[in-house]
Image (tube, grey):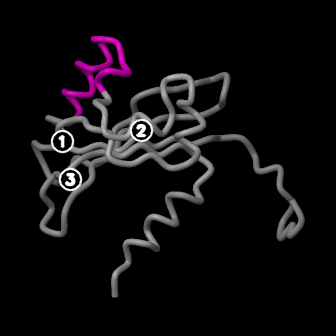
């Protein structure tokens, strides 16, 4: 069974931005939330471009360091990269690995800390 459409749907439905990159730092996927989040930088048109074009030199240096850390050990898979107090969120870089454990890319993960405002089992938005 091909699970690809299921995994894509999980990412597409996530309210937090998700940006996947290959090891050349090319943006290979953005979910709709990321397209909205980065609209001023080009939104979905960023797919196929270098993530490094979106960051200042110091940030690019840290991205490279994280990727090298991911490469160094298969257990190196998550690193905390940023805190945004105004949005009450933490940002991480997460390793993407193939079935054999080889590093194939990485993604940016946003975790918001606000309490959910939707009511439990609230079917009407």
Decide whether residue 55 is among the magenta residues. Answer: yes
Residue 73 versus residue 64 in the image, above or below: below
Question: Where is mark 2, residue-wise?
Answer: 92
Label 1 crowding class (10 Å Cα cut-off): few <14, some 14-19, many 20+?
A: few
**Percent position (x, y) of residue 95?**
27, 48
Q: Earlier in the sequence, mark 3 or mark 2?
A: 3
Mark 2 or 1, nearer chain start? 1
- The percent coordinates of residue 11 (x first, y second) are 50, 58
**Residue, disc 3:** 75
Vertical order, 13 against 38 (above or below): below
Looking at the rendered image, the quarter that the C terminus falls into is bottom right
Q: Residue at x 56, y 48 (%)?
A: 32
Neighbourhood count class around disc 2 (C-alpha, 10 Å): few under 14, some 14–19, many 20 upward: some
Looking at the rendered structure, the secondary structure element under dot 2 is strand
Q: Is residue 116 left or right of residue 13?
A: right
Q: Which residues are magenta?
A: 52-66
Between the C-alphas of marks 1 and 3, the distance is: 17 Å
Instruction: Report the quarter where the N terminus lies.
Output: bottom left
Mark 1 — residue? 23
Q: Which residue lies at the image location 41% right of the left edge and 40% below the top edge?
A: 108
Viewer-side label of 3, 2: 2
Which residue is most to the bottom? 1
Give the mark toward the camera: 1 or 3. Answer: 1
Q: Estimate how packed mark 3 is, as few (under 14), some (14 to 19) or many (20 or more) residues with alpha carbons within 10 Å.
A: few
Q: Magenta segment, principal secondary structure?
A: helix
């Amino acid at each position: 069974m091909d699970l690809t459409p299921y995994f894509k749907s999980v990412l597409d439905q996530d309210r937090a931005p998700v940006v996947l990159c290959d090891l050349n730092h090319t943006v290979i996927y953005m979910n709709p939330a990321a397209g909205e989040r980065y609209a001023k930088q080009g939104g979905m048109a960023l797919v196929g471009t270098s993530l490094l074009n979106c960051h200042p030199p110091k940030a690019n240096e840290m991205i490279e360091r994280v990727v090298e850390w991911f490469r160094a050990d298969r257990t190196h898979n998550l690193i905390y990269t940023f805190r945004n107090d105004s949005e009450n969120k933490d940002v991480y870089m997460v390793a993407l690995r193939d079935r054999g454990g080889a590093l194939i890319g990485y993604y940016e993960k946003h975790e918001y800390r606000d309490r959910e405002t939707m009511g439990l089992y609230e079917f009407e938005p």
